[in-house]
Image (cartoon, rainbow, N blue to C red):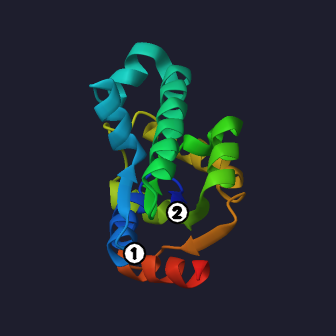
Amino acid sequence: MIISLTGFMGCGKSSTGRELASRLGARLVDLDAEIVEREGRPIPEIFADGGEEAFRAVELAALRAVLDEADARGGDTVLALGGGALTRPEARALVFARTRCVWLRTRLETIRERLGAADASRPLFRDADALFAARTPVYAQAPFAVDTDGRTPGGVAEEILEILR
């Protein structure tokens, strides 16, 4: 089984993913880390060189490769998606068809507390209000949702396991 975690930056995809993978004895794949490894450069540099559209193309290719590798390996995989991964219809179709996708629903106020008012390492964070409003309906298409406000990654992981059982 492949479980994917989606949600806005700072919602806890990576930390919850680690907890979930540990509880399942599963492999954890962080899609952003995979992109950095495959491209040999940081995400802000990919954005700077080609803009968001170029990054999304790289992200979609990495997503396909990760899903194919997970299927070939067998066993359980937890996939922490990038915050904008599901904004492309092709990526949504892949994720919804091939994984059990869970939206880590988090209020923007909580995200700001977690990340600070501005995080220069995240190229799109300066437009957080508009981005959050635009992406929320995309995340809401996920078949499962778990609220993360005021909760630990372990508590969120436990609820995900209960939902998916």
Q: Earlier in the sequence, mark 2 or mark 1?
A: 2
Q: Depth check: give the residue in front, 47 or 142.
A: 142
Q: Depth check: give the residue in front, 46 or 136.
A: 46
Q: Position of residue 17 (x, y in %)?
A: 39, 64
Q: Residues within 10 Å of mark 2 (few under 14, many from 20)?
A: many
- The kind of residue on which mark 1 rests is Leu
Quarter of the image with the C terminus in it: bottom right
On residue 56, the disc is none
3 sits to left or right of 117: right
Residue 56 quadrant: top right
Q: Position of residue 37 (x, y in %)?
A: 29, 33
Residue 43 in view here:
yes
Q: Secondary structure at mark 2?
A: strand
- The kind of residue on which mark 2 rests is Ile
Q: Are marks 2 and 1 in contact (CB under 8 Å)?
A: yes
Q: Position of residue 40 (x, y in %)?
A: 27, 25
Q: Residue furthest top?
A: 49
Question: How far, Cα to Cα, is label 2 from label 1?
Answer: 11 Å
Please give the name of the residue rendered at 52% of the width and 58% of the height, measured from the top-left corner.
Answer: 4
Q: Residues within 10 Å of mark 1 (few under 14, many from 20)?
A: some
Q: Compared to 53, does 148 lie above or below?
A: below
38 sits to left or right of 1: left
48 sits to left or right of 90: left
Please give the name of the residue rendered at 36% of the width and 39% of the height, measured from the top-left corner.
Answer: 34
Q: On the image, numbered disc 1 is attached to which residue?
A: 24
Residue 127 in view here:
no
Q: On the image, numbered disc 2 is attached to which residue?
A: 3
Please give the name of the residue rendered at 33% of the width and 66% of the height, measured from the top-left corner.
Answer: 18
Q: Compared to 148, does 44 lie above or below?
A: above
Q: Compared to 87, does 117 lie above or below?
A: below
Q: Secondary structure at mark 1?
A: helix
Q: Position of residue 98 (x, y in %)?
A: 63, 53
